[in-house]
Image (cartoon, rainbow, N blue to C red):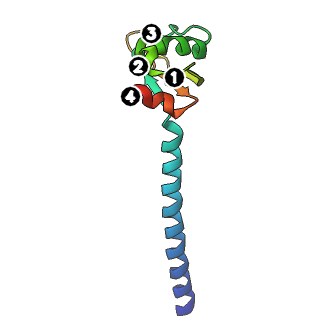
């Protein structure tokens, strides 16, 4: 029994170490996937129209200044967050994911 308990304790140590390693990897990957995002708040629902990608590819250079972008601003996707639709005084935030991280760093 003592040998079995010792073996189980050793196995638990290995599993805990692997678990911590996997947690760090997941956290890194989640942060890496978010780094190209821009969060826009306080824009009334419906302002972006039916094609938010087209709207923000034109709107962002206008608001932030076209000189900050080396060329055409490529947006991978743009959408409202999945929060429930609130009252009109507090619109849902918008997430805009840029194709290149370098575009985001130009104006931040």
Q: Position of residue 65 (x, y in %)?
A: 42, 14
Q: Depth-wise, is mark 3 or mark 4 nearer the camera? A: 4
Mark 1–mark 3 distance (CA, rounded to whole Å)? 29 Å
Q: Nearer the viewer, mark 1 or mark 3?
A: 1
Q: For the residues labelled 3 and 4, say whether their Cβ atoms are less than 8 Å apart.
A: no
Q: Which residue is mark 2?
A: 41
Q: CA distance from mark 2 to mark 4?
A: 16 Å
Q: Is residue 43 visible?
A: no
**Residue at the location (58% across, 14% down)?**
52
**Residue holding disc 3:** 44
Q: Position of residue 12 (x, y in %)?
A: 52, 75
- Image location (x, y in percent) of residue 18: 54, 67
Give the labeled residue for mark 4: 108
Q: Residues within 10 Å of mark 2 (few under 14, many from 20)?
A: few
Say above or below: 70 vs 27.
Answer: above
**Residue 8 visible in the displayed image:** yes
């Amino acid at each position: 029994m003592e040998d079995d308990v010792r073996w189980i304790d050793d196995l638990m140590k290995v599993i805990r170490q692997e678990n911590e390693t996997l947690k760090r990897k997941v956290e890194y990957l989640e942060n890496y996937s978010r780094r190209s995002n821009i969060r826009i708040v306080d824009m009334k629902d419906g302002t972006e129209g039916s094609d938010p990608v087209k709207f923000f590819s034109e709107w962002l250079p206008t608001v932030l200044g076209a000189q900050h972008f080396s060329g055409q601003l490529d947006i991978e996707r743009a959408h409202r967050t999945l929060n429930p639709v609130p009252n009109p005084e507090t619109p849902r935030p918008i997430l805009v994911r840029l194709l290149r991280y370098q575009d985001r760093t130009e104006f931040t």
